[in-house]
Image (cartoon, rainbow, N blue to C red):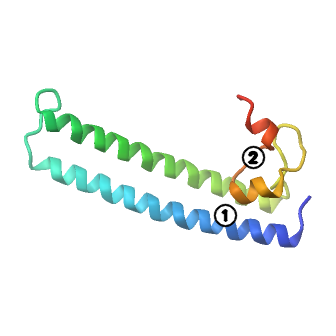
Amino acid sequence: MTSPARDALARELLAADRAATLVRLGDLEADVALIVEASEGSNADDEHDPEGATIAFERAQTSALAASAVAHLREVTAAEGRLLDGTYGVCEVCGDAIPDARLEARPTARTCVTHAARPR
């Protein structure tokens, strides 16, 4: 199921995915810091100030996106672990090979297309 060329491509894709996610996470963390900094000097009351609700929403939304990026980094790390133990590209549900096209599109995929479509 694995080959040196396939593993090398997977390592390359996962490294690029990790790098892009780290950049996105850094940008999001900077955005959160700017939102917090901008709201520190104001007397925004989320309940009564129309801008307060917007600031709170932006902070919550940006924080949620940052948490999602952190979770994705965990998925990249897990995929790298599967590469090391020889289970990368094997569906965790049925044990069949995950198609190369799926792995190229989503290098962190844990399941084949059939099982990805099914609710867990």
Q: Give the mark, 2 or 1, whose residue is nearer the N terminus.
A: 1
Q: Which mark is residue 14?
A: 1
Which residue is depicted at the point 89% across and 67% down? 3
Amino acid on which the number 2 mark rests in the picture: Arg
Is residue 54 shown left or right of residue 13?
Answer: left
Position of the C terminus, as image quadrant, is top right
On the image, the x and y values in percent for residue 4 come to 87, 72
Is residue 12 shown left or right of residue 68?
Answer: right
Amino acid on which the number 1 mark rests in the picture: Leu
Number of marks drawn: 2
**Compared with residue 58, is residue 22 higher up or lower down, i.e. above or below?**
below
The image quadrant that residue 82 belongs to is bottom right
Kindly tell me whether residue 91 is visible in this rendering: yes
**Compared with residue 12, is residue 48 higher up or lower down, i.e. above or below?**
above
Label 1 residue SS:
helix
Q: Which residue is mark 2?
A: 110
Which residue is depicted at the point 17% across and 37% down? 52
Q: CA distance from mark 2 to mark 1?
A: 13 Å
Kindly tell me whether residue 107 is visible in this rendering: no
